[in-house]
Amino acid sequence: MVLLALLALLQSCSGGYSFTGASIPPGAKTISVATFPNYAATVNPQLSQKLTDELMQMFSSQTPLDVMSNEGGDLHVEGEIVGYDTRAAALSASDEVSMNRLTVTIKVRFTNNIDPEANFEQQFSRYRDYSASLDFSMVENTLVGEIVTELCEDVFNKAVVNW
């Protein structure tokens, strides 16, 4: 009986919520995600496509929205990669670099054509530390993959999760 009541309640709710915690405004059917150009001083040639694809996949798999590339969605995400930096993060007892840090920064503009009060423009940064004894080219893809996932989660949560 309780299950039946719960199903009836869920069915009567029109849009608005998914089991991932996303809160989609009623009437929103589509989201467009524009390619994030890379304006960082150091350019990772795969980063732009990787970030854009993962963001599109996240909205596709975690919301009922139809995902479109470029523009024209009820909701729209665009931005650019503005930072891709590797710096020393920690020194050893002998004052040698023991850890390095890769930081990726993106600038995002989110437009909600259903509820313009939800629009935002914000920078997001994420980083990963790695041993200075490792060759950066050997760990770069792994680090970038982890950072991109976190950045996409940050954008997704800011855009459609109301915690």
Image: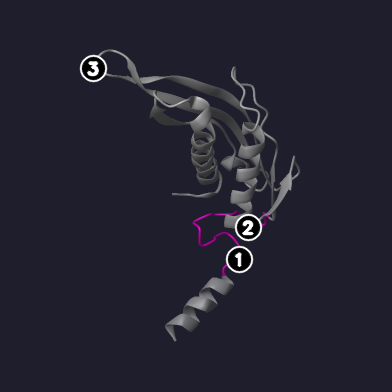
* Residue 56 in the image: above or below residue 43: below
Name the residue type under label 1: Ser
Label 1: which secondary element: loop
Residue 88, image x and y in percent?
39, 18
The local crowd at label 3, few if under 14, some if 14 to 19, many if 20 or more residues have their Cα within 10 Å, is: few
Q: Amino acid at mark 2?
A: Pro
Neighbour class for label 2 at 10 Å: few (<14), some, many (≥20)?
few
* Tag 1 and tag 2, C-beta contact below 8 Å: yes
What residue sits right under mark 1 in the picture?
14
Q: Main secondary structure of the magenta part?
A: loop
Q: Is residue 161 left or right of residue 30?
A: left
Q: Answer left or right for 67 relative to 9.
A: right
Q: Is residue 36 left or right of residue 129?
A: right
Which residue position is annotated with label 2? 26
Label 3 element class: loop
Residue at the farthest bottom position = 1
| Element under disc 2 | loop
Disc 2 versus disc 3: distance between alpha carbons? 58 Å
Q: How far apart in space, not on screen, are marks 1 and 3 (Cα)?
A: 60 Å
* Amino acid at pointer 3: Ala
Residue 21 on image: x %, y % = 49, 56
Q: What's the magenta region? A: 13-28
Q: Residue at x 28, y 12 (%)?
A: 95
Discs 2/3, front? 3
Q: Identify the residue at image location x=61%, y=44%.
A: 55
Reading the image, the residue beneath label 3 is: 93
Residue 64 counted in the magenta span: no
| Residue 45 picture location, percent across and down | 65, 28
- Is 19 magenta? The answer is yes
Q: Residue at x 55, y 41 (%)?
A: 152
Above or below for 130 versus 158: above
Q: Give the total number of marks visible in the rendering.
A: 3
